Amino acid sequence: MAACLLDTHVFLWWVSDAAQLSPDVFETIADARNPIYISSASIWEIAIKEALGKLRFDADLTTVIEANGFTELKISALCAAEIKALEPIHRDPFDRMLIAQARINDLTLITADRNIARYRDVKILHFKKSGTT
């Protein structure tokens, strides 16, 4: 059993295009024994991208999270403060928050982002999108 935090793109692929996920990632998320978390930072990121017209998500995020059996992981002050301890590998503030949350909460962060995979002090399940080499 592995408690996992989904990167924003992984969550979006799960609900709209699961074929993008590698088989091991799909199995990990689908296994009901694995607690799966979605960060409130991801919800915020999706809302911003929707407002800017960069993304279309035609469902209520909280309903989708609950319907999939996932749990929202709220941003704590401890996680926010952890940002300063992160190496400056990744500049995206949303991804930096996910990394901090994974570290503080001892979660495996599932991502296809190569920059995130460069962090050594975080448990990461990194994968390539299906169909890529």
Image: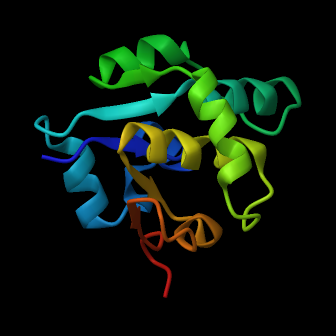
Query: Residue, x 33% and y 26% (percent of image)?
Result: 70
Q: Is residue 98 above or below residue 129?
A: above
Q: Position of residue 45 (x, y in %)?
A: 71, 32
Q: What colouring does the structure picture have?
A: rainbow
Question: Horizontally, is 51 left or right of 28 in the view?
Answer: right
Q: Is residue 61 above or below residue 79?
A: above
Query: Residue, x 74% and y 36% (percent of image)?
Result: 55
Name the foreground residue: 43 vs 87: 87
Query: Residue, x 50% and y 80% (percent of image)?
Result: 132
Q: Is residue 30 above or below residue 110?
A: above
Q: Position of residue 124 (x, y in %)?
A: 41, 62
Q: Position of residue 47 (x, y in %)?
A: 73, 23
Name the foreground residue: 35 vs 66: 35
Query: Residue, x 77% and y 51% (percent of image)?
Result: 92
**Snapshot quadrant of residue 15:** top left
Name the foreground residue: 54 vs 35: 35
